[in-house]
Image (cartoon, helix red, strand yellow):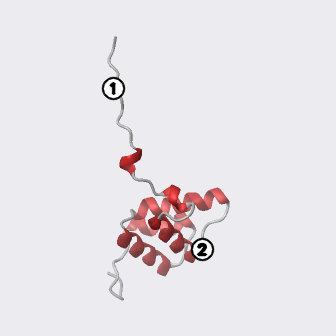
Amino acid sequence: MTACGRPMPEYETLSHFGALNANSDPESIVKANLLCNNMGLDTITTAATIAAYGEARGRFCSPDEILDMVRKIASREGRAMLWRRDRNATARPSESRSSP
């Protein structure tokens, strides 16, 4: 727990919302962790998705933009709608092939 009683992010969450997103604002990392936990999002996947978006556009998100992107992913708003997929809906069982 942080000094103000909020859950402390796990190491991977810190690294992904921090270094992977070129974000050095610890408060935004704690807030992103809380948002993900409250909205049922995996923190590592969400942070990696936001980092990939920043890498693709050639500019990482600011701390406020990261928090906004977490909200958009959770609510499937705008482009973020495409980033949050139901894994069960997109997963395909491997087809077994029998030898002739």
Q: Are marks 1 and 2 in contact (CB under 8 Å)?
A: no
Compared to residue 28, the image places residue 51 above or below, namely above
Give neighbour class at mark 1: few <14, some 14-19, many 20+ (Cα, 10 Å).
few
Residue 6 spot, x, y in % from top left:
35, 82
- Which three-letter amino acid code belongs to the residue tagged 2? Ser
Depth check: 51 or 68 in front? 68
Q: Quick one: which residue is furthest to the right in this view?
A: 58
The N terminus lies in quadrant:
bottom left
**Residue 60 or residue 98, whichever sits in front:** 98
Mark 2 neighbour density, 10 Å: few (under 14) some (14–19) many (20 or more): some
- The spot of residue 5 in percent (x, y) is 32, 86
Question: Could you give the CA–CA distance between mark 1 and mark 2, rounded to whole angstroms?
Answer: 46 Å
> At which x and y percent is residue 82?
52, 55
The image quarter in which residue 36 lies: bottom left
Q: Is residue 39 or residue 16 the one in the foreground? A: 39
Residue at x-position 56% and y-position 77%: 64
Report the disc number at residue 67.
Answer: none
Q: Nearer the viewer, residue 75 or 36?
A: 75
The quadrant of the image that shows the C terminus is top left
Residue designated by label 1 = 96
Mark earlier in primary sequence (1, 2): 2
Secondary structure beneath disc 2? loop
- Name, please, the residue furthest toward the top: 100
Residue receiving disc 2: 62
Image position of 3 with respect to 9: above or below: below
Q: Residue at x 48, y 71 (%)?
A: 71
* Element at label 1: loop
